[in-house]
Amino acid sequence: MSAYMGRELLLFTKSIWYGALLVLTYDILKICRNVIRHSNAFTTFEDLVYWIFCALFLFARFFKENSGILRGYLAAGIVVGSLACYFSISPVFVRFFTFLSKKVWKVLLIPLKIVKKVIKRLKSSLFQGKMFVKRKIGSGVKGLGRHFRNNNKGEEADEEKKGRQKKTRKRKKQKK
């Protein structure tokens, strides 16, 4: 076999490898989509970026290895490699790594849930401190309480309830 034919055969095997590599790269995208749900718009954007990456990757590889000359057997090699990988390795690869990634994701979410609970408790404590300051300052200096008013309905309901309680206490004192 001549050196030219050997070089062409090597390019053909590389194009088969590139086709399989592109399918495995897309499988990584599928795994990410299975673990973390995406909107249709984001999925479309991912696909667009993937295909641009594929075009640039193949162009760079073939330009470097074959001086930019496109041959039919290179495209055939990519198709053969893609189909071979898609029907043999891809289903097992996606299923296994989706399962593994979901387990890892659940483990990673544990600290995030703890942090979320701590933040929720801190917010609750800060809210209670704010209400305490509001009561102390608002009752001590007339007119200052209005500066601490918030549009939060929970706070307004608390203030209305306290106002009603004060009125009932005054009525009870007047009746005695």
Image: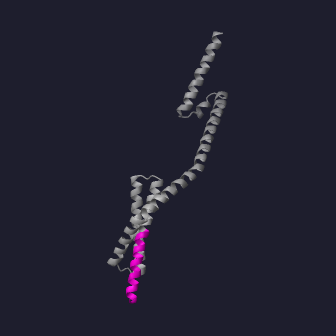
Judged from this view, the residue extending furthest toward the top is 176
- Residue 174, percent across and down? 64, 11
Judged from this view, the residue extending furthest toward the left is 72
- Residue 127, percent across and down? 61, 37
Direction from residue 83 to residue 100 in the image, left or right: right
Q: Report the predominant secondary structure element of the magenta stretch.
A: helix
Quadrant in the picture for residue 138:
top right
- Is residue 161 in the magenta section? no
Direction from residue 13 to residue 131 in the image, left or right: right
For image coordinates 45% across by 60% down, the residue present is 94
Say whether residue 43 is visible.
yes
- Residue 115, percent across and down? 60, 47
Q: Could you say which is closer to the camera, residue 164 or residue 120?
A: 120
Quadrant in the picture for residue 1:
bottom left
- Say above or below: 78 vs 7: above
Direction from residue 79 to residue 176 in the image, left or right: right
- Is residue 18 in the magenta section? yes
- Numbered disc total: 0
For image coordinates 32% across by 77% down, the residue present is 72
Question: Which stretch is magenta?
Answer: 1-21
- Residue 166, percent across and down? 61, 20
Q: Could you say which is closer to the camera, residue 20 or residue 53?
A: 20
Q: Could you say which is closer to the camera, residue 39 or residue 17?
A: 17
User: Quarter holding the C terminus?
Assistant: top right
Say whether residue 53 is visible.
no
